[in-house]
Amino acid sequence: MSVALAQPERPDYLNDGYGIKSWLLTRDHKRIALLYLASITLFFVLGGIFALIIRLELLTPAGDLVTSQTYNKLFTMHGVIMVFFFLIPSIPAVLGNFLIPLMVGARDLAFPRLNLLSWYVYVVGGVFTLTAAITGGVDTGWTFYTPYSSTYSNTHVVLTVVGVFITGFSSILTGLNFIVTIHKMRAPGLSWFRLPLFVWSMYATSMIFILGTPVLAISLVLVGLERIFRIGIFDPHIGGDPLLFQHLFWFYSHPAVYIMILPSMGVVSEIITCFSRKRAFGYNFIAFSSVAIAVLGFLVWGHHMFVSGQSVAAGVIFSGLSFLVAIPSAIKVFNWTATLYKGSVSYQTPMLYAFGFIGLFTIGGLTGLFLATLGVDVHVHDTYFIIAHFHYIMVGGAVMGYLGGIHFWWPKISGRMYPEWWGRVAAVVVFLGFNLTFFPQFILGYLGMPRRYHAYPPEFQVLNVMSTAGASILGIGYLLPLVYLTWSMRYGPKASANPWAAKGLEWETTSPPPTENFLETPIVTEEAYAYAAPGATHV
């Protein structure tokens, strides 16, 4: 992609300074990415533990494990932690932080101190939320629907929303940093249409961060004010309107779905082009579809409110807009498939995760069309069908992309290779465990099992047992990468600068990269993904 530059021997970013202080005060985007990786992994483990307890509770119809009040707190904390502290920041904060300066040929992000501040803000928000969990939890659901959250709940609502509110600023700072870096710090020759598709996806994600997150922050502030001062914003008894919160919340939270999925789409674009040894089919369409998804995502919040009493006309309009947002998503899937066509495909671990992403995201997307249809949505509203659809997009899509990206760039991040056989095993186990967990929930929802119930009629038990068994397998699948990636940091074979023979500036520096990324500013002379013609030997 660029003129290769000689890289003399010098300390890499991992060895350039020792001790906790050198990490906690670092301004190196790569070290900050690792700080995020450690924090986000902790939250992922906590959210996963809550999920496993929920599934154990649902093994029996009577709900013998925990009380209904505890169950409400479990699914709330699972949702809050997974959405706000794992899914939203995972790829942007970890892979985006690590890769964007490398991919655009810069020494660091535009505002290094601001980047470190965003991690501290994230941690402070997490401390508030975990304090709420430890001191009794919250039972409103991750959506904080009013007037229950603002008036009736006796749990730690204020502490939790303060935590989420603070964390939102971390996203805004990160998005601002990315946009300025991509605009102002690209290497010579790196035009907009030579940018890696991962950078395009992060650019679109950053737009949503900056435009949408303040709306969520305002909504949560209003919940806190209503709860403390009773000023009549959401409580109908004192002149408020509970539906106002739903409008504000979903105006952010539906675009937030694309915050979670767009970065994964960028990761998959990088992996598929590399492991099929082909240029991206329809590069411009993939790039612009990311921006289109970001824009259209702000217009479809009303499809979450089909049964809220909004007018039929509003329902029809939001239904149509929801179908519209499926078009750019379908363009991406079509172009990935066309890229694979007649490619020299190799089935390395990142590619297995990319295949898993395409399959699971397609199922999640198609079932989203069901929910965009007014009549079907009314039938399955607030049932397990919604949970299955949501998890096929968020877990099947976002997490598969995250794991694929971690494996793809792990040699660059750690300077070490992981055991490929175990990587493939884990990818297959995750895929099988995921489908066994969530596909039965489509049937449960269609048959009428409501979400958020800790007890259910006996006829639903078989499908719930299947789902719980799948969750156990999925848990093992997630544990495997945690073990062998940790092992590889010390015992894995050393990685070359470009172990996948991939294109992109990040592969033209050492593994792991030096602190300043490049000794000299690279000069880009090629389009992105200038791989050899079809039929070339793959790695």
Image (spheres, rainbow, N blue to C red):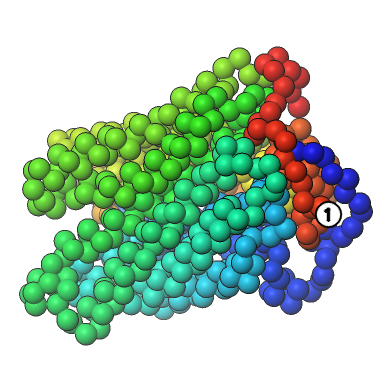
Which residue lies at the image location 20% right of the left edge and 39% below the top edge?
A: 319
**Residue 223 falls left or right of residue 526:** left
Q: Is the residue 48 above or below the residue 169 in the image? A: above
Q: Residues within 10 Å of mark 1 (few under 14, many from 20)?
A: some
Quarter of the picture holding the N terminus: top right
Residue furthest to the right: 9
Mark 1 element type: loop
Residue 184 in the image: x percent, y percent? 60, 55
Q: Is the residue 379 above or below the residue 47 in the image? A: above
Which residue lies at the image location 8% right of the left edge and 48% below the top edge?
A: 311
Of the pair 363 and 217, the residue shown nearer to us:
217
Residue 321 in the image: x percent, y percent? 25, 39
Residue 429 in the image: x percent, y percent? 57, 36
Question: On the image, numbered disc 1 is attached to which residue?
Answer: 519
**Residue 130 falls left or right of residue 324:** right
Q: Is residue 36 visible?
A: yes
Q: Amino acid at mark 1?
A: Leu
